[in-house]
Every structure is written in structure tokens, then in C-alpha cells.
Image (cartoon, coloured by chain):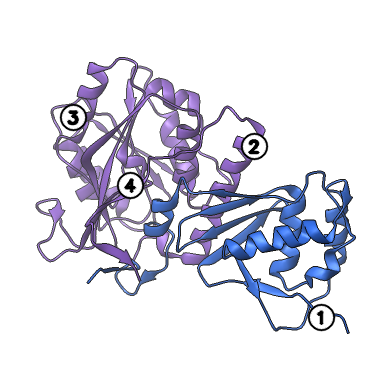
Chain colours: A purple, B blue
Amino acid sequence: MPVYNRERYVVSALRSLVRQRDVDLDIIVIDDGSTDGSAEAVRSMMRETPCIRLFRQANMGVARARNAGLRQLPPEAGFVSFLDSDDISLAGRFKRDLACFMADPRLELTYSLMTLADRIDDERLEPAADSRTMTLRGISLSAAVFSRGLVDRTGQFDEDFEQAEDTDYLLRVFETGPNYELLDAVAIYYRRHAGNVTREHSGRVRNHLRAIHKSMRRRKADPSLHEVQGIFELKGPANWQML
Amino acid sequence: MRHANVYTIASKDIVFESFDGEAVVLDLSSGKYFGFSDSGSRIWQALSSGVDAQALIGLTAGASTIGPAELDGFVSQLVELRLLTRSDAPAQPLPGDLLAALAATSEPLNVSVHDDLADLIIVDPIHEVEEPLGWPAVKQAS
């Protein structure tokens, strides 16, 4: 979990993980030079939950923070997932995914749905009654559980990206044709709020185009790589349409 | 006077960038994205910045010379894909560095269409969002 100035949300994100006592979690938090109380908020959780490990670095951006997290993976970690510091991991999502891996030893990746929500009840860790929601199979590292072998094979996050490093990473993963399973269950609530880094529009578009360009270039250089057909889709509500 | 063939970006849903001289275009309304050969990238750059299509005929590109039929076919394709549309604006001069870049290309004019990320591009996360809540620009169908 990379954290940058998210004292308002990071405890909810961590609570959503540590409540999942049905799996053996090692929670690696990289504080990317926060200037607010994020690190203190994480420490307050660590007193009761030793499975959280906090590492701090000067602010270097989310791609470098994610790579710092990957470097802290213990050798024995069999599976890897991500959670952003303002999102909520649904109870039972890891147990469900791990059951898929147990049932199919060749499986390398599970990829679930995400629900966007603009109001989250931080007590219940659920969308508030008056929240708008939208469920889709979108770009989210948190929707995935990766086998350790797939993470090692995929390598680092591309540090050229200020944003859309997750898009680039997932495209790289899917292009190689991993043995994946798409699960029709929601893995995370993605919190839409005024502080989302994804809301700075021109930079977001440029970074997204860069990810697409790199993907096309890889596929041109190596025709054995795949398009990522049939992965990403809008699930609901079914009656939404573009303005 | 020769009639100018000037084009412009077909709508505000068409966004594009060039990386190392390679153009990538995204149609936010359909979710399709478009890649180009090396010569196609340079011609896209010229046309999207308002250079007269006629002025490109006879230039060296893709280890050959751009013929009128080849260029016409390429431009028609970009118009049919709703990336470009005719414009009444005055033609812009062809930048000198683009001429040199075009001469250095090795592939014929080509545009490729991709729709594997369509749903993703349409809905999230790059679309313009409503203020102040940061919601994707969607409305409920009636």
C-alpha cells in the first residue's frame, strides 16, 4: 500500500485488510514522504496489528513507492495484491481468491470487479446509503491477486509514469497471456473523492496514452504478445450511458 | 488557385499524443484507440496540425514517394474513423523538422484500430469528471 497524505482514509483502508483474519497477510505500507499525519495513523494501527510493516521514503511518486513495496516482499510470500490508501478491500475477498488458486495450481492471476462509490461509511467500510455506485471490471491493481511467480516475471513498475503505472503494469501482465480467472465478485470499493490523483485530467490522459503507446510498441516488437481483449468491461448499472 | 485540403480533429473526444515521434490517438466516445506506422504517425501529426494534405503529395516517406491515391486513401480512412474532419481554416505550413522526420521513415502509411480497452476507456478512469464529486461523465438512460 503506497500512502501519500492520506491520513483521512488510510486507517479505513488498513482496517479493511486486517479484518480479513481468514488469510495470513503481510501488509507492506510505503509512506511516500507524506507531510500530514499518515505515518502516525499507520503506526497507531501497528500497535495492535503486527502484520503491518511501515517503510518511509522521501516523496518519489507512486511508481517508485510501489517498487519499494515489491522489494519488501518476504521470500515466502506466495501471493501478492495491492490496495490504495483510500480504498476498501471487501471482507472475504482474499479467501475467495486463494480458494481459486488452491483449486487450480496452474492459476497465476485472479481478477475481480471494483465498485466506484462517492460516499463510504468509514465505520461499516461499506458505501453509504446515499452513495452513487458503479461496478466494473476496470483497471485496478487491487482487483488482482497475483501469484508470486507472475509478479517476479512481470518485474518492476515503470518509473517513467507519474500516473497510469497501474495501467501499464496490468497491460504488461495480460499481454503475456497469464493463466487467469475473472471473478464476478467485487474485490474493492474505489473511493471517488476530490483528492483522487486521477482527477488531474490532462496529465491523466497523457499518461494513459503513454501506457497504450508502450503496449502497442511491445506488441509490434513481439507478435507473440496478446491484446487484452475481453478483460475490461462495465458491469453495471446496466442502464448507464455516456453523456 | 489550388483548392486546399485542410483537416482538423473531428471532435473533442479525440485525444492524441506523440511519443518518440509515434502517434497514438484515442476516441473517448467509442473507447477505440489507434496506432500508426512510422510514416502514418508523421502524416497524422501534419494533418492534425492543419497542414494542407495536397502539400504532402510527392514527399519522401516510408522509403518511397507519397502518391495522391495513397494519401487520399489514408486521409479517407482517418475521416471515416471520425478522427479528422474537413476544415475551412487556412492551411498551416509544413514544419521543416517534420519533412526530415518523414523522409527517415521506413513503413508505408497505415493506421491500426484497437478496441480491446473500449469499455475501460469509455468509463474510467480518464474521462472528464463532473465537479465536484469526481464521478465519471455518465448519465442514466431514460
Residue A125 seen: yes
Label 4, label 2: how many angstroms apart (C-alpha)? Answer: 32 Å
Mark 1 crowdedness (10 Å alpha carbons): few <14, some 14-19, many ≥20:
few
- Compared with A55, A179 (above or below) is above
Q: Chain of mark 4?
A: A
Mark 2 crowdedness (10 Å alpha carbons): few <14, some 14-19, many ≥20:
few
| Residue A183 position by quadrant | top left
Q: Chain of mark 3?
A: A
Amino acid type at circle 4 is Asp
Residue A58 seen: no
Instruction: Tell me which numbered mark, 4 or 2, is placed earlier along the sequence.
Output: 4
Q: Which mark is residue A96?
A: 3
Instruction: Between label 4 and label 1, give the one nearer the viewer.
Output: 1
**Does residue A184 appear left or right of residue A171 in this picture?**
left
Instruction: Between label 2 and label 3, give the one nearer the viewer.
Output: 2
Q: Which mark is residue A220?
A: 2
x, y (%) of residue B105?
82, 48
**Secondary structure category for the residue under label 1:** loop
x, y (%) of residue A19?
13, 37
**Does residue B121 appear left or right of residue A37 in this picture?**
right
Label 2, label 3: how many angstroms apart (C-alpha)? Answer: 37 Å
Say which residue label 1 marks. B3
- Compared with B97, A65 (above or below) is above
